[in-house]
Amino acid sequence: MIPPETIATIKERTDIVALIGESVKLSRSGRSFKGLCPFHKEKSGSFYVHPDRGFYHCFGCGESGSAIDFVMKQNGLDFREAAVLLAERAGVTIEETREKRPERTGPTKDDVYGVNNIAAAFFEHELGLARTGPKGNPLARHALAELKKRGMPSLSDESDEARQWQNTLAAFRVGYAPAEWDGLASYLKRQGVSAEVAERAGLLVPRSNGSGHYDRFRHRLMFAVMDTLGRVVAFSGRALAAPSADELGPNAPSYDGPEPPAKYLNSPESPVYTKGHQLFGLYQAKRAMRERGEAILVEGNFDVVSLHAAGFEHTVAPLGTAFTIDQAKLLKRFVPRVVIAFDGDGAGAKATRASRGPCTEGGLEGRVAQMPKGLDPDELVRTQGRAALANLVKNARGMLEHLINDALDGDAFAASTLSEQNARVRAVAKLISDENEPTLRLMAKSYADRLSSQLVQQGRAPEDLSQLERLIGQAVSGKDREAPAPREAQRTLPAAEAAIVGALFDFPSLLDDRRVENGLGLLQGESALAVVALRQHVRAHSQKVDPEVLLASLPRSIHSFAAQRLASPRFEADSSARTHLLENLEKLEATSRKREVAAAVMTLEKGSGTLPFDAQAEILRELAAKRKRTFDE
Ligand SMILES: [Zn+2]
């Protein structure tokens, strides 16, 4: 722990105006200094720095704090890192209390940063992009060819685009690792760097026979991975087309042969690099991310570099791993929102789904820019222009909305098997129940409802999609979060219809009663289907009821009602069942007559004055007939 007195000394000795002045243009304003706020977008300065108080404050966005806070915020560092950085700057020695680290021999973090920096310079030199100075390694032409494939203009080109590429490649310290087994190893030796340090950094690998080291990265296009302060913490090397035997020649006979090497090779973990803790391009993207208030997350290193060159300088990538919670938290230090722009293929869709958790855990708002099928963002820009990507990013969907849309996608859904469709529906219910924010959950629910009813209306999904509503209902109410496999939604029949169908289940013989038979035409929907099924059943089973067989022929939505009624009939005598049934048929008749009369009256009212007299008279005659007609003869 850094003692409080030391913290106070660091603050005292730091000239906050000079510190902030390095990145913000400040001018005197009364007793303070004033400039454009680095933490929010503004045109007139509302960012004030008070030299005597060692304090800054923005009237626009409310950011404020000490020099340490500024360095933390500006560089995405934690308190300790920021304090150490300022201490070095101000020449303050930090004597940390307790937890004195055990005496460790072996390379320190600083040693590793040092060797990484030397290696990055070596790789840059080998690529030979610098406009002046010696040309690079002859085999670097394979690396240049790969860069050209990704849209890099000719080096002699004087266009803005070419300059932008030059700047980007320099900012990313892109380089070339030579094909020899000991290209870097012998260079480091000449520089007096110990092989032990280079091994700790993951640059050299000890030979199995114990005689020295060889280069981990050979014949690769090299990307330097930097932390938020621009220190090189690792490398990522892209495989290149194999050089020919002629090219390799006597000077480089040891390139490791015909086996196709892994497309990307990343540094192993080291004292300064933990897998899943860094984002490729973050250092270079920091400023643009702050200005735009969001970051674009893409899959590959090349996407990052070429998008930066194309002006999307707020782009980063997760460096060969799935997007992790640590990476989300790191990003959150700079921006509140990330737009995920993974490749438009199955793997990209899967990686997008997998990034929801880290976004939620990291407190980052995730949005999704869906790439066209088969394209990655880099290809999109090269084939359809910058505007195409800018548009997708601007119209990016909320993460939850995207995932629901993905699961209930019309074509994919219709093409799935029934069990796949069920899995999709369950996935949607789970997505919604996993959302902790009630407003978002409700919005997601209504969105899912809308999509599912569209599917049913378009005839692309079974009507059973009603189960979705039920599952989501359960999910939203927070009950039954681990829902069992969905069963059919059970509907309740309207009371009169339930009474009629129930009486018939009790005494199927009533189907042959003349008055009953005349009235059954009033039934609709499931109750009508149930009566048809019952009639066929008793005919086929010589007037007896076999409940299991009958149930199998009934609409599934009334299984529960039918099973109860078949198991425990309500009436003892068929005469009382008949009376009850006829009463309810009368009720149904009355209801439907009322509806017809109301419709006729409405037609008359609407048409009065315009309908010819004859037509009005016709409607009235029909009305009178309806009033008289009953199912009773
Ligand atoms: Zn501000």
Image: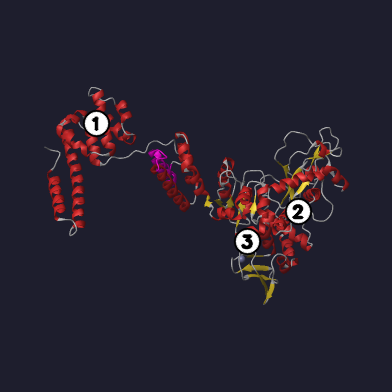
Q: CA distance from mark 3 to mark 1?
A: 72 Å
Q: For residue 507, which quarter of the picture?
A: top left
Circle 2 crowding by C-alpha within 10 Å: few under 14, some 14–19, many from 20: some
Is 467 magenta? The answer is: yes
Q: Nearer the viewer, residue 403 or 474?
A: 403
Residue 132 in percent (x, y) is at: 82, 56
Q: From which residue to which does the magenta span run?
A: 458-479
> Which of the two labelled residues, at mark 1 and mark 2, occupies the earlier sequence position?
2
Q: Is residue 77 visible?
A: no
Is the Cβ of the residue at disc 3 closer than 8 Å to that at disc 1? no
Name the residue type under label 1. Answer: Phe
The reply to whether discs 3 and 2 touch (Cβ–Cβ < 8 Å) is no
Badge 1 residue CB within 8 Å of ligand 1: no
Q: CA distance from mark 3 to mark 2?
A: 30 Å
Crowd band around label 1 with a 10 angstrom C-alpha radius: few (<14), some (14–19), many (20+): many
Marks 1/2 in contact by CB < 8 Å: the verdict is: no
- Circle 2 is placed at which residue position? 155
Does the segment drawn in magenta span residue 252?
A: no
Q: Earlier in the sequence, mark 3 or mark 1?
A: 3
Q: CA distance from mark 1 to mark 2?
A: 87 Å
Respond yes or no on whether mark 2 lies under 8 Å from ligand 1: no
Dot label at residue 505: 1
Q: Earlier in the sequence, mark 3 or mark 2?
A: 2
Say what secondary structure mark 3 lies in.
Answer: helix
Label at residue 291: 3
